[in-house]
């Protein structure tokens, strides 16, 4: 009996440490009674059931389409013998959706295909076209999230030694056969991983459906959001997002225990004799490149359109030049800009430090709860943002720690939620550092402090910058978790954009979005510059700061 | 600075093993390295050479026993307090530091002045033949150059002893031979005590003053290369150092006149140390391939055999000769002048009275 009680208190203690877990417990607690009633009530409601299946359907489709596009894109980038300029262009186009608020393309969709859409209404003259529904939500989310698949698959495809393919050719295989029997199987774990990442991203996205799904295609995250912000029913919202937890957890477990184990000890080693990559038949090159260009073109078109919308009076109605929208965001919206920059600025160094600190502890096996720690921080990351947001709200609403309404809660949310990139980068770098390097330093008379400062720290510095960059980008662009955490005192640009969208003041929304993209681009450029300055020829590399 | 010796007193080290629980990597090892001597730890993979070396360096703490450098007991001392130079198998160069900074590292830790550092680093880089490489980074160097940087980095701090863990195993065969000559020359020029780990017996013989052969965590024999080759005191050492034939025999009599043996049904007389064996005892004979002389069949009272294979290598020919159920290895030098035997040809094998070591025991 006592051991059970002890286990229970321990369980509680652990739960309390992680707000996200805390929320899931709250949903089951009703006046101290553990009950499944909440959940049953939800599942009885046909509307909610529909929303649940819709969410899964959407996520699965986004996963499939996004992974497909990402693969095409990655294949073109590393397997088609493109020139550097081409690859840079492809990279740049894929970077845009990653560094903008997740619903940017949704806004552009409304501009293009909405009731007064540039394309449907003005260009094609279609009157009754409805932009709202599964098709456009799918299209928009796919476009937004495919870069994640691209970044996940690119290094995997690049790591396949062309000599392996040459080998298959030399054994008499045709190109298609090589692709089918060598290239594809080596990529399968990456494909699965990309699919799961996109699935989770879509499952967490409530803003795109909020703008594009309409009444005919309700999805759960949006329902939960409306439950809380519209009906002020915190518990109802929590329960709704709890339902989301199930597929999210399944995805997480699949990724952790299945996909990660399937990775073939990447076929690295020294790339043998340089050989031109022959995976792509000459006739297939043109269609592949055209497809990628089309994709890049659509993305570019969306952002140009967004910019255009931000400098005309009213897109679709009055195309007269104006700076008015920018005036609006720099007066009325100035507080949001200031707050966002302050929060991102505070979160940036904290996130970078937290990332290398935790990464160091994890990699060096310094403390026993390592596994638990790693899992908790990864759960924070893979949970849908809505759940995390609600969790923080509930966890810090009452004493002992009351943070609701402060900027600190938003900073904390960003730091904890987005530091896993830094943590993983640190762990990856540390694993590349042979223990004998630290011993060499010790043998030369250096104590452990000196060794850490002079040897270890410089070697993991790239991970610090990677972690810091990601926290900054997310602080500027993420919305799903923090929308529940903003207050009169602290608000965010992304939240303002969404408000603008729902009030149909599209001009300021566009101006805000452009501002975010510009700021993020400038900061990323600065960070990359720093990284390059600090990089000595022999330093280790962080592969990508934004990949899965 | 005069060189100091190293003394290891019955050190042991156990490691956790997933299946066997705890296993000894090193068990009760005693070893003395004389000042300015180069002693090699030689043995097959996994015998505990690296572990022993790392305990001398202080990277590993022994579970029992003591380590002395000079007269100082360094057993509890961290590696950074021992003033040693360690050269790692993978060189362990600091990838983010230039060649200059790699070498300067230990001096910076000692807080020497910039001027002293520049001077010392310049000198040592010249010593290892790397002038002008200061600004290169480790990943821009060849394997041999990295090796030299590692060496320079180890010796620039004027360590009391130099420790090498298979420093040449990442180099190609030619360079390995060249570098070991350089290492040896440098060690003698610096007049520094060194412990060198390798599993390559030829390298060990070429470079060392003395060799300690390790087997399963213990030192089984110590001595000069010549000692070990001529007087191995176990089958393991006999087979590990050089090539050898092991034959079984029975002592018929041992006395002042030498040892009378019966080997492969034939009579054999050796002029060995008769005190070590007694009549009737079963012994093992360590017969090196080059001491056996091959003669055409029915020439005298040698052991008859048949040539089973022949490898002609110019200055020597290597034969395998079938004697009863056994295959003996025989090396014949200057074969062109002395005449080659062809496969299938019957021959007689003649064993000299000297140069054959007797080991006790073994199956009859
Ligand atoms: N850190 C460790 N943990 C567990 N076992 C170890 C550890 N280090 C060494 N061992 C074990 O101790 C034994 C001796 O290892 P050691 O590295 O000293 O061998 P070695 O003689 O240097 O071999 P090699 O020539 O292959 O380098 C081996 O069986 C090895 O598996
Ligand atoms: Mg070893």
Image (tube, rainbow, N blue to C red):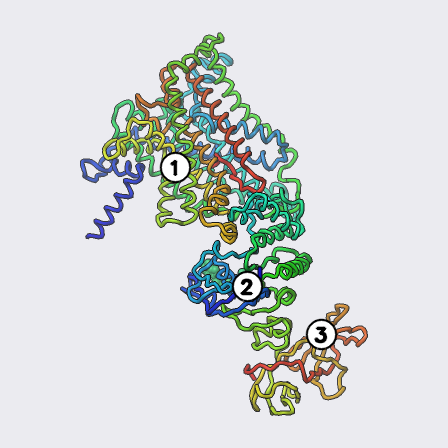
Query: Which residue is under mark 3?
Result: B331
Residue A87 position in % (x across, y down): 59, 31
Quadrant assignment for ligand 2: bottom right
Residue B203 position in % (x across, y down): 63, 64
Measure the C-alpha gap from mark 1 to mark 2.
58 Å
> Which of the 4 quarters of the picture holds residue B115?
top right
Q: Which mark is residue B281?
A: none
Residue A393 position in % (x across, y down): 29, 31
Name which of mark 3 and mark 2 comes first in the sequence. Answer: 2
Query: Which residue is under mark 2?
Result: B4
Badge 3 local density, few (<14 within 10 Å), some, or many (20+)?
Answer: many
Residue pictured at 64% horizontal, 81% vertical: B356
Query: Which residue is under mark 1?
Result: A381
Residue A342 position in % (x across, y down): 39, 25
| Residue A315 vertical placement versus B233 (above, below) | above
Nearest to the observer: residue A376 or residue A147: A376
Q: Is residue A164 visible?
A: no
Nearest to the observer: residue A173 or residue A311: A311
| Residue B280 vertical placement versus A314 (above, below) | below
Ligand 1 within 8 Å of the CB at mark 1: no
Q: Is residue B347 left or right of residue A359?
A: right
């Amino acid at each position: 009996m006592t051991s059970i009680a002890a286990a229970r208190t321990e369980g509680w203690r652990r739960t309390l440490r992680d707000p996200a877990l805390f929320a899931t417990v709250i949903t089951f607690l009703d006046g101290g009674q553990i009950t499944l009633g909440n959940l049953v009530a939800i599942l009885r409601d046909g509307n909610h059931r529909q929303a649940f299946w819709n969410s899964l359907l959407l996520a699965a489709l986004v996963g499939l389409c996004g992974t497909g596009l990402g693969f095409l894109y990655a294949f073109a980038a590393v397997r088609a013998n493109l020139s550097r300029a081409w690859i840079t262009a492809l990279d740049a186009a894929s970077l845009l959706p990653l560094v903008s608020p997740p619903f940017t393309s949704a806004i552009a969709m409304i501009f293009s295909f909405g009731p007064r859409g540039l394309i449907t209404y003005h260009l094609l003259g279609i009157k009754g076209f409805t932009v709202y529904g599964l098709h456009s939500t799918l299209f928009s989310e796919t476009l937004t999230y495919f870069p994640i698949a691209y970044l996940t698959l690119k290094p995997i495809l690049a790591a396949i030694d062309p000599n392996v393919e040459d080998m298959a050719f030399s054994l008499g295989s045709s190109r298609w056969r090589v692709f089918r029997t060598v290239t594809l199987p080596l990529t399968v774990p990456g494909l699965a991983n990309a699919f799961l990442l996109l699935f989770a991203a879509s499952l967490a996205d409530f803003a795109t459906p909020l703008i594009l799904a309409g009444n005919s295609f309700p999805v759960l995250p949006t329902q939960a959001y409306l439950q809380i912000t519209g009906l002020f029913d915190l518990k109802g919202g929590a329960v709704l997002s709890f339902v989301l937890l199930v597929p999210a957890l399944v995805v997480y477990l699949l990724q952790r225990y299945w996909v990660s184990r399937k990775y073939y000890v990447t076929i690295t080693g020294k790339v043998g004799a340089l050989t031109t990559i022959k995976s792509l038949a000459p006739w297939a090159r043109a269609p592949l490149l055209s497809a990628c260009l089309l994709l890049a073109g659509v993305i570019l078109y969306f952002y140009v359109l967004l910019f255009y919308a931000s400098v005309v009076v009213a897109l679709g109605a009055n195309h007269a030049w104006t700076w008015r929208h920018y005036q609006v965001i720099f007066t009325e919206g100035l507080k949001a800009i200031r707050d966002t920059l302050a929060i991102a600025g505070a979160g940036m160094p904290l996130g970078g430090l937290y990332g290398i600190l935790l990464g160091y502890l994890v990699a060096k096996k310094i403390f026993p709860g390592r596994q638990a720690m790693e899992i908790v921080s990864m759960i924070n990351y893979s949970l849908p943002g809505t759940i995390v947001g609600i969790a923080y709200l509930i966890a810090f609403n009452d004493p002992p720690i009351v943070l609701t309404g402060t900027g600190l809660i938003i900073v904390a949310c960003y730091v904890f939620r987005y530091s896993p990139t830094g943590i993983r980068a640190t762990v990856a770098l540390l694993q590349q550092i042979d223990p004998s390097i630290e011993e060499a330093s010790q043998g030369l008379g250096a104590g452990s402090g000196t060794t850490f400062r002079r040897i270890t720290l410089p070697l993991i510095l790239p991970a610090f910058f990677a972690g810091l960059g990601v926290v900054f980008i997310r602080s500027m662009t993420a919305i799903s978790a923090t929308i529940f955490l903003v207050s009169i005192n602290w608000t965010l640009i992304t939240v303002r954009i969404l408000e603008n969208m729902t009030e149909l003041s599209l001009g300021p929304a566009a101006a805000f979005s452009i501002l975010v993209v510009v700021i993020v681009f400038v900061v990323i450029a600065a960070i990359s510059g720093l990284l390059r300055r600090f990089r000595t020829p022999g330093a280790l590399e962080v592969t990508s700061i934004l990949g899965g | 600075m005069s060189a100091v010796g190293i003394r290891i007193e019955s050190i042991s080290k156990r490691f956790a093993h997933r299946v066997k629980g705890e296993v000894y990597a090193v068990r009760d090892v005693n070893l003395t390295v004389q000042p300015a001597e180069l002693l090699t730890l030689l043995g097959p993979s996994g015998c505990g050479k690296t572990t022993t070396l790392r305990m001398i360096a202080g990277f590993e703490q022994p579970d029992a026993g003591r380590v002395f450098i000079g007269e100082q007991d360094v057993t509890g001392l961290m590696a950074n307090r021992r003033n040693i130079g360690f050269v790692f198998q993978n060189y362990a160069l600091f990838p983010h530091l230039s060649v200059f900074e790699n070498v300067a590292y230990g001096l910076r830790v000692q807080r020497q002045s910039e001027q002293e550092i520049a001077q010392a680093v310049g000198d040592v880089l010249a010593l290892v033949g790397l002038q002008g490489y200061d600004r290169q980074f480790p990943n821009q160097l060849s394997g041999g150059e990295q090796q030299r940087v590692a060496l320079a980095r180890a010796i620039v701090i004027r360590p009391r002893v130099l420790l090498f863990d298979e420093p040449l195993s990442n180099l190609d065969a030619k360079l390995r031979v060249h570098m070991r000559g350089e290492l040896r020359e440098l060690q003698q020029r610096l007049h520094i005590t060194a412990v060198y780990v390798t599993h390559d017996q030829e390298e060990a013989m070429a470079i060392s003053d003395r060799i300690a052969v390790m087997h399963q965590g213990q030192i089984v024999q110590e001595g000069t290369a010549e000692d070990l080759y001529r007087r191995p005191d176990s089958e393991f050492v006999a087979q590990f150092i050089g090539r050898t034939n092991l034959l079984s025999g029975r002592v018929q009599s041992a006395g002042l006149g030498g040892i009378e043996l019966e080997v492969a049904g034939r009579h054999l007389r050796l002029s060995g140390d008769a005190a070590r064996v007694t009549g009737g005892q079963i012994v093992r004979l360590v017969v090196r391939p080059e001491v056996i002389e091959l003669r055409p069949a029915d020439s005298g009272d040698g052991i008859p055999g048949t040539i089973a294979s022949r490898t002609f290598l110019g200055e020597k020919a290597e034969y395998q000769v079938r004697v009863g159920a056994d295959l003996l290895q025989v090396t014949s030098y200057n074969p062109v002048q002395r005449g080659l035997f062809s496969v299938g040809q019957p021959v007689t094998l003649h064993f000299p009275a000297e140069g054959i070591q007797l080991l006790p025991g073994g199956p009859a």
